[in-house]
Amino acid sequence: MARNRLFQTRKHQLKKEELGLNEWMTPPWLLEKIYKIFPSGFDIDVASPVGIDTAVKASHCFTHVENGLEQSWDGFPIIWCNPPYNDIESFVRKAFLEMEIT
């Protein structure tokens, strides 16, 4: 079962890659497991895609238009981040800096 889901996820990602998109969506089956820990979802998605429906439940979001790297994440206790794959390091660095602030 898990292997089948992984295959479906890779297939979905490859299709998006073929389209030239840099944003791969978090698979709904993984989010379902995460929502067991965070049933209300997240306070913010700091790397939300534009124009693509996601299964991420977040009260607020930053897309590349608002640029989550340039915004303060302070005041959002539960943060979701599935960064664009060409800029993972910047989002990890930002998360570390935001953690030091609080």
Image (tube, grey):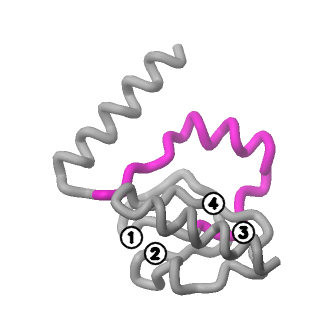
Residue 48 rendering spot, x and y as whole percentages: 49, 66
What's the residue type where badge 1 is placed?
A: Val
Q: Magenta stretch: give its range.
A: 22-45
The residue identified by callout 3 is 43
The Cα atoms of the two marked residues, 4 and 2, are separated by 12 Å
Q: Residue at x 63, y 75 (%)?
A: 60
Cα gap from disc 2 to disc 3, whole angstroms: 14 Å
Q: CA distance from mark 4 to mark 1?
A: 16 Å
Q: Amino acid at mark 3?
A: Asp
Q: Answer with mark 4 or mark 2, whichever residue precedes in sequence.
A: 2
Which structural element holds mark 2?
loop
Graded by Cα atoms within 10 Å as few (under 14), some (14 to 19) or many (20 or more), the crowding at tag 1 reads few
Q: Is residue 26 magenta?
A: yes
Separation of disc 1 and disc 2 at Cα? 6 Å
Picture residue at 59% right of the left edge, 72% below the top:
94
Q: Residue at x 19, y 56 (%)?
A: 20
Q: Which mark is residue 63?
A: 2
Q: Which residue is mark 4?
A: 80
Where residue 33 sits, quadrant-wise, is top right
Residue 57 percent coordinates (x, y) = 64, 58
Label 4 vs 1, first from the N-terminus: 1
Q: Residue at x 80, y 44 (%)?
A: 37
